[in-house]
Image (cartoon, rainbow, N blue to C red):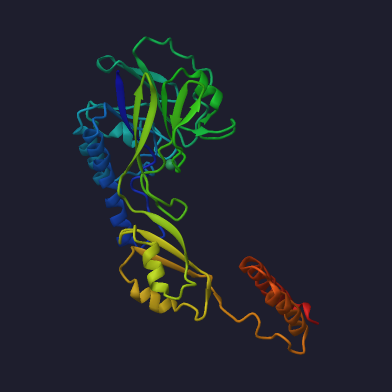
Amino acid sequence: MRELKLLCAADLHLDSRFEALPEETAKKRREGQRTLLFKIAELAERHGAQAILLSGDVFESGAVSADTQAAFIKAFGAVNMPVFVSPGNHDPYSSSSVWARMHLPENIYVFKSEKIECVGLDDLNLRIWGAGFENSFCRPVLENFNKPRKTDGVFDVMVLHGDVCAGKSDYNPITRRQLEDSGMDYVALGHIHTRSGLERAGETIFAYPGCTEGRGYDETGVKGAYLVTVSEAGVKAELLPLGGVRYEIITVDVSGGDVLEAVKAATVELSDNDYCRIILKGECEELPDATALRKALAGRFAELQLRDETVEKRDVWAQTGHDSLAGVFLAKLRREYDAAVSEEERRLVELAAHYGLAAIESGCEK
Ligand SMILES: [Mn+2]
């Protein structure tokens, strides 16, 4: 059975400014971003891909450093396969853009306008369709696109930067109906930074691989590229992690007492390249010592943000029988607690005591 393998990546945002970081760290992050290009190229070769599809926002802006241009050319000029680029809203194509200025190797093809064009790869029995942003905004390029006449044994694949939505967007809005009517076997998308998994519109399969590396706590988790396999039997996609910097927000229940051990256990997967926001939760007899925790974890992550949302553990029954509203309330509940026939019932009564006490203490007792 004929099978086509495509390495699909998008939203690399190379040369991001990383404004929130110190300049030296930001520079390192930009260097790190460039290594992702080589990782993508290496994975494409290792997995036997027949083409690399880059669905836009390869660069953060039109100001692309010489180092980044050189890395792009070196990484993808060296692969033994064609590379297709659909410029996005961050790196649109124009005659003065970096896409036009770079001396690209022959195997790299950039779609240059909002009008969809087709590149036939006869030896692969493959047609690659695509378009590119010409500005920061883009009209719906799939509107009025005429489904190509299918040729037996030839796959039709599109590479596109755009916004799959109900139809209203300034960034090449794409409707599911248009995808369904496109006649494509697969549409490799870019623009949405969270990977989508494979989606279907009629006979057309499409996906966003998401951004290649997190740049903030709104882009958490493992990021990567998709290895997409297209065959007569259907389309499959496998996430290939690129190993870049990772952001995570992790809630750690530290009720058990040993805060450091609980945090360590919750973060085993993270490396010292990663950015970590830890939210401490739970009831503690002693509130966590943030300074000591920071000290103990120094150097463990590229960044550690700590948020302490723990509450002090208290004996909810301490005021039982006191000459106060709380005392009377607790005495009444305590009788129910002692008479409870199951652990679950006791737990519920204790919860009621907690809530009632909190309500009384927050000002109901006048
Ligand atoms: Mn983007």
Q: Quadrant of residue 330?
A: bottom right
Q: Position of residue 193 (x, y in %)?
A: 44, 43
Query: Vertically, is 335 above or below 274?
Result: below
Q: Quadrant of ligand 1?
A: top left
Query: Vertically, is 309 above or below 66?
Result: below
Query: Vertically, is 22 above or below 132?
Result: below
Q: Residue at x 42, y 57 (%)?
A: 248
Seen in the image, is 230 located left or right of residue 70? right
Seen in the image, is 161 located left or right of residue 109? right
> Can you say which quadrant of the picture contains the N terminus?
top left
Q: Position of residue 160 (x, y in %)?
A: 42, 29
Note whether residue 174 is visible.
yes
Seen in the image, is 123 located left or right of residue 13? left
> Can you say which quadrant of the picture contains the C terminus?
bottom right
Pick the front one: 31 or 126:
126
Q: Position of residue 86 (x, y in %)?
A: 38, 30
Pick the front one: 308 or 269:
269
Pick the front one: 203 or 181:
203
